Amino acid sequence: MKPRRNPAGESRPSAPLLPLGAMMLAGFSAMPAAQAQQAEAEKARELPAVSVQADADKADGYRATATRVGKVLQDPHDIPQAVTTVTGALMEEQQVGSLKEALRNVSGLSFNAAEGGRSGDNMNLRGFYTFGDMYLDGIRDTAQYNRETFNHEQIDVLRGAGAMLFGRGQAGGVINQVSKTPLRTEQYKLTGSVGTDGYQEVTADINKPINPNTALRVNVMHRDEGSWRSNPATGTEPELHREGIGISLGLNLYTHNQWWLNHYWLKTNDIPDYGLSFDAATRAINTNFPSETFWGTDRTFDKSDTKMTTLVNEYRFSADSTLRSQLRVADYERSYWARTPSATIAPNAAAAICTTPATCNGGPTRVADYETVTLQSDYSTRFQALGMKHEALAGVEYLKEKSFRHSLLNVGGTTAANPPLFLPYVVNTAGNPVRFDSDSYAVYVQDTIEFVPKWKATLGLRRDQMDATYSSATSPALEYGENSYRSALSFHPAEDTHYYLGWSDSFSPTADLYQLTVTPQPPERSEVVELGAKWLLFDGDLSFRAALYQATKHWERNGDLESTAAILTKKRRTKGIELEAAGRIDEHWEVFSGLALMDAKILEVAENVNATTGVITLANPEYAGKRARNTPKYTFNLWTTYKFHNGWKIGGGVEAKGDRQAVNPSGAGAVPTLNGEYHPNTAPAYARWDAMVAYEHKDWTLRLNVKNVFDKLYYDSVYDNGGFAVPGTRRAVILTGEFKF
């Protein structure tokens, strides 16, 4: 059996420079700066220079061999927790543009439709929200916007409670996007795509080494896309217009003191699609209007401007000890006016729903500005003590958040003759905006101990402190301190086999993503137990994993920012089984597939505090024992390709999900029924098939993708409170040309 590749390439010293962590915060470094410089100088005299390519986080085919989702660079096979990685190669072959499209490859994941202030990427994993668990290169990226993948090397999904490693979060897992960074070799790739429904995309990936230790990488993207749906009154379609740039400058690369300066900018200018409403009588998708019907117009909009600048330093004291520090400044601006669908009123040119000529609703609006400053530093080391091997981690983090959120100003009227009209970023002068200003501090420590050969125990603890002020008159401030825990027992009978039993306990505060109540409610707590196995097959080219888990959440928060009931359920649980395979079966045949079976139930109904009186209100007890919303009983995904000797490659696959229920279980009113039985609004199960054929040359590639080959009408996302569901793409054909030089 050939040996597994080491994800951490060796690096050797050059000029001694202080690490970012030591410069930014005293105490980050494991030794004083003077000692670090002296040790570095001594090593420079002792060790010969070597050149080893160390493209951290760069995936190979469909099986990722390196990830930082566990805070250090390691093979996902060695992490005692379920990990799914969507690699760059997989996204490229599927002609993926958005994060949402990429995550169709993740089993156990479902999509929430926009509304209630959650417009943007919004997913459920193992039945639990992930809106507080979005990360970019290990730093929180929880703003609500639509993410693109042109600057992503891969996407790592760490399943289960991840707050011990990442901070406050949910029970489903962490979604970490990995940015492209400079490579050692000169590389240029230009890509152009055209397709049905006005699809046009141009991307460029340019990597330029400047000298042996300095390199620049630039990724750019521009994409326009229409839809198969339209407003019959105007002909307007939902549209995507997106452009972005990712720049990464690597300094002092392949030495003991590496630096990266990264800047990311993404601008979106869309006409948003809020789908079709549910029928109150049938609990199914409304059929009063054809599925092609769209209620938005060219007046409605979804605009965002995202900017992030990050300074990264990786300081290696020795082959066994590394300090990695990051400083990021980010600004997320967002403004949208969307038109929700109606079950009875046809679309019109004004994007208004008028119940009478004098009563017209313009639909949801939002303007928001979210600013963050993040400083984090992680120290990892390996050593032996008391006859046992240790892999220790320690880290600190500071997060500054400032948020402004309000509705838009209606510059029109409220009648059919003078309908509502909103303009981007024009803030409503009435009402009170939601403001949030917080400082968060965290420290964590973890040790993985090989106490006897082939057996390892992992123990971790994290402490988070938050001091926040709000614009709320009833709850203007919040202070909290909470612990999160992680533990695991691993057995490695052979290098290619890993069995583990893990337990984690994490939290989210009462004000998670800025919801408050008159009386502070207990924080969310999430307990996850997972029994898993991982195997490497075919000389390590194919990974296969299985996991059996139980995730329990207490005091679950509502995902709808506009809801007056902050608590969704008091206790609920998901039990599940997952199977996943990724990699090469032989040199021609690759596969990526996952199956998830989930049983998600409400165990105890919500307890909420009345915003006016402070009285405790209970949800209808009949919700106890019912299925959790937007959690299908099964999901399945498969993508496979076969490459012929003459350069041709064919591929295809399927994405399938069971039916998903859309209901708000926090209310005291009657439960939804159909024919006398419990039956909430339900989006039907579906299976979407895709196909690909390509001709690959070392300098160029021509690829044809057909999405939804059988032109299936399906609904891939639901507004989980029950109002509407958004249909997925119908048959779409995209032709792509790639030129490498």
Image: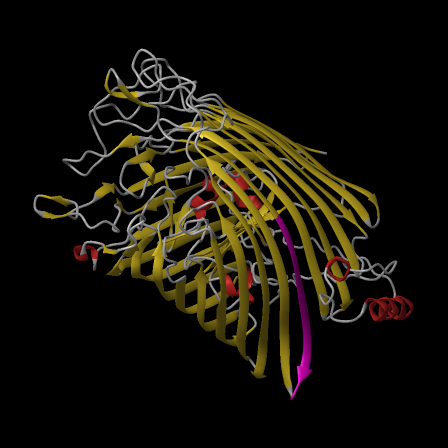
Q: Residue furthest bottom?
A: 386
- Where residue 257 sits in the image (x, y, percent)? 79, 59
Which residue is painted at 38% across and 34% down in the image? Answer: 708
Considering depth in this image, is 263 or 361 the residue closer to the camera? 361
In the image, residue 369 above or below residue 74: above
- Where residue 175 sits in the image (x, y, percent)? 50, 52
In the image: residue 398, left or right of residue 563: right
Q: Is residue 97 magenta?
A: no
Can you see residue 417?
A: yes
- Where residue 623 sits in the image (x, y, percent)? 20, 55
Considering depth in this image, is 65 or 563 the residue closer to the camera? 563
The quarter holding residue 66 reads bottom right
Which residue is painted at 54% across and 78% down in the image? Answer: 456
In the image, residue 127 above or below residue 323: above
Stretch in magenta: 373-386
Which residue is painted at 20% across and 45% down in the image? Answer: 680
Q: Main structural element of the magenta stretch: helix, strand or loop?
A: strand
In the image: residue 736, left or right of residue 230: right
Considering depth in this image, is 69 or 113 the residue closer to the camera? 113
- Where residue 539 sits in the image (x, y, percent)? 56, 63
Q: Is residue 383 magenta?
A: yes
Q: Residue furthest right?
A: 45
Which quadrant of the figure contains the N terminus?
bottom right
The quarter holding residue 27 reads bottom right
The quarter holding residue 49 reads bottom right
In the image: residue 121, left or right of residue 627: right
In the image, residue 336 above or below residue 580: above
Q: Residue furthest left?
A: 676
In the image, residue 678 above or below residue 574: above
